[in-house]
Image (cartoon, coloured by chain):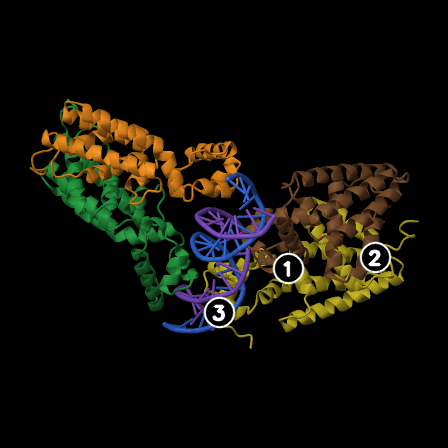
Chain colours: A yellow, B brown, C orange, D green, E blue, F purple
Amino acid sequence: MNALRADAARSRERILEVARRSDPKSLRLNEIAREAGVGVGTVYRHFPTAHALLEELTRETLGRLGEVAARACADTDSGRGFETALRAVVDLHLEAGGLQAVLLADEDVGEEVAALKASIFERFDELLRRAQEGGAVRPDLSAAQVERLVCGVEHAIRLGEPADRDVFVDTLVIGLRPSAAPMG
Amino acid sequence: MNALRADAARSRERILEVARRSDPKSLRLNEIAREAGVGVGTVYRHFPTAHALLEELTRETLGRLGEVAARACADTDSGRGFETALRAVVDLHLEAGGLQAVLLADEDVGEEVAALKASIFERFDELLRRAQEGGAVRPDLSAAQVERLVCGVEHAIRLGEPADRDVFVDTLVIGLRPSAAPMG
Amino acid sequence: MNALRADAARSRERILEVARRSDPKSLRLNEIAREAGVGVGTVYRHFPTAHALLEELTRETLGRLGEVAARACADTDSGRGFETALRAVVDLHLEAGGLQAVLLADEDVGEEVAALKASIFERFDELLRRAQEGGAVRPDLSAAQVERLVCGVEHAIRLGEPADRDVFVDTLVIGLRPSAAPMG
Amino acid sequence: MNALRADAARSRERILEVARRSDPKSLRLNEIAREAGVGVGTVYRHFPTAHALLEELTRETLGRLGEVAARACADTDSGRGFETALRAVVDLHLEAGGLQAVLLADEDVGEEVAALKASIFERFDELLRRAQEGGAVRPDLSAAQVERLVCGVEHAIRLGEPADRDVFVDTLVIGLRPSAAPMG
DNA sequence: CATGAATGAGCGTTCATTCAT
DNA sequence: AATGAATGAACGCTCATTCAT
């Protein structure tokens, strides 16, 4: 099933290579084909939709995201584990611009991606729950909400300089802490 | 000077009406004309570019943004003033989707918008500075950075339910507070 | 009949003023109206077509063209008269870019222009005939053909530098002389 | 390398066919597509700009222009060679209306066209120079000026009847001869 | 009369997607 | 399986002309 003909594999690789250099927000299959020296049809054969291609581009990052979560779960200090993970997650979002779209998509094209996403969400649920139980994170937030907040910070950083990253993530980290009433 | 002919005003209003229902991120003047039952030329007469139309859509909101800032400046408690303003600003961003683009644009089409923006930025600088001096906000943030963070929160809220609004803004408000070292 | 209301006369004059500064090959009535600070409708009222406006722009030049022809007719040396006229005609073509279109038009909008054109053609016929009889110009050319050759030279000059004018006109003048068989 | 697929060749040919019947001064790619029964995209694929299409329409003519020049260079009588060439050049301009625009263009789309033009210009420089040295052509004209005069004659002929051609070219040929002072 | 708002045909151009080769 | 030619909808924009005010 995974046995690709040699030339097919080569095409696929070239496509991915070009796609990685493209803006993940607007993958234009036509242009990618041209730059990869490959017919449009070939691109469509390998990746029936732009989203399928995006998933493929993101797969490796998804793997690292899973590892990040796993490592954080292993931390005995649940608060510290959560924070470390959070920072890593933002970094991965910044690295792979398509991550947001893939994570938020309701439907997944590839089974592997679906599985990866499921496991990631599961681990983050766990991670968050324990951090909340440990009193390190405010208890009224779901993992999905945190994910959206991460996307928000990603967005904010992209609007300005990369140098904003650290401060912005700090505000997120702090913002997630339980606290006295905000306006008290 | 601003006296528009009756039919012109009607067209203009129809255009704006349609535009308000459109995605402010991608105002397509042709489509707007069609939906407004108006010739393309009419749209271009009133709004030479999509950005001009966006500015118009946003103008009222900009005015309210100015008022928000003014009111907040008048608050004797600089921290409270800042927080109240921040919440209102996020709300205005949510109401008027184009606000982000208009505020971040380098060039403005209308003079009025330019003036409004200038005064808004000025007031927010003031507001932030005083909140920082009062110890209510971490001192290492510029007003521009705060604006970007607001855009981030707007983005996050739009990704999910409107119900997220309050919690998400809370995290921002708290995140901006000065604090012990984030991971300490 | 010619009694124009004061404001009408003012509009008319402003329109002509702007039109004189415009490219006579492509008079855009809309743009002229805007630059003249006048409604499009006003332009159309005064000049129902672009050609009508062009005729008006050209009228003075047509007058001078008539004078040129008259003066040349008065020259006792028919060859010299013709050549002088020819040079002047080219100059007028260069000055008033619309002259070509007006002279070559089959239909005239204004009666005055029609009359001017008729008298000009008549005089040039006369002028040419006498130059031909005097042996100064090859006898196998009609006045209409000479006019077209003038337009050709105008075109050639416009393709390059104004400095070409003298040499190019020279080649025309010489080219019109009777001569031994061209490939002799 | 130049092997076009059968259907592509057919499209291309249809496009060119329609284009040949169009006014080369204003090739409207949309209209051509419509008339050729072909999608707009197809036209753009073959000819990215109107000028590219014009060049293609002209390419064969450019080739013949080169041959004309070559043959003329081979003539032992430099004056006769020049005159023969001149007549042929005018004819080619009349045949291919776009020739003027292609020759006068600063930038060329196709390399082949650029090369053809360069060689043509070179040969005509040579041809003119020799004719001038031989006393057959007035020495104060550059090849570029002669080209412009040719365009002028083309223009003049197009204004009237095709029958004008011979006489008009005669006047050019004679006009280029060295001569006593034009008005003496 | 003057105005200028409105019209809408039509051009240039792009791009996702299909399908003949 | 791969190719890339073809498609055509749709957008941005311009401009000559009409017509309500």
Q: Nearer the viewer, mark 1 or mark 3?
A: 1
Q: Quadrant of residue A19?
A: bottom right
Label 2 element class? helix
Q: Are marks 1 and 2 on the same chain?
A: no
Q: CA distance from mark 2 to mark 3?
A: 49 Å
Query: Which numbered marker is on residue A98?
Result: 1
The residue marked by circle 3 belongs to what chain? A
Label 1 element class? loop
The residue marked by circle 2 belongs to what chain? B
**Does residue A10 show up?**
no
Q: CA distance from mark 1 to mark 3?
A: 24 Å
Residue, x 38% and y 55% (percent of image)?
D47
Residue, x 23% and y 27% (percent of image)?
C70
Q: Residue tagged by mark 3?
A: A8
Q: Residue furthest bottom?
A: A1
- Residue C68 lies, in percent from the top left, at 26, 27
Query: Which numbered marker is on residue A53?
Result: none
Residue, x 65% and y 69% (percent of image)?
A113
| Front position in the image: B142 or B45 | B45
| Front position in the image: B156 or B19 | B19
**Does residue A110 show up?**
yes
- Residue D7 lies, in percent from the top left, at 35, 68
Q: Nearer the viewer, mark 2 or mark 3?
A: 2
Above or below: residue A157 compared with residue C142: below
- Residue C140 lies, in percent from the top left, at 12, 39
Above or below: residue D13 compared with residue B4: below
Q: Residue tagged by mark 2?
A: B167
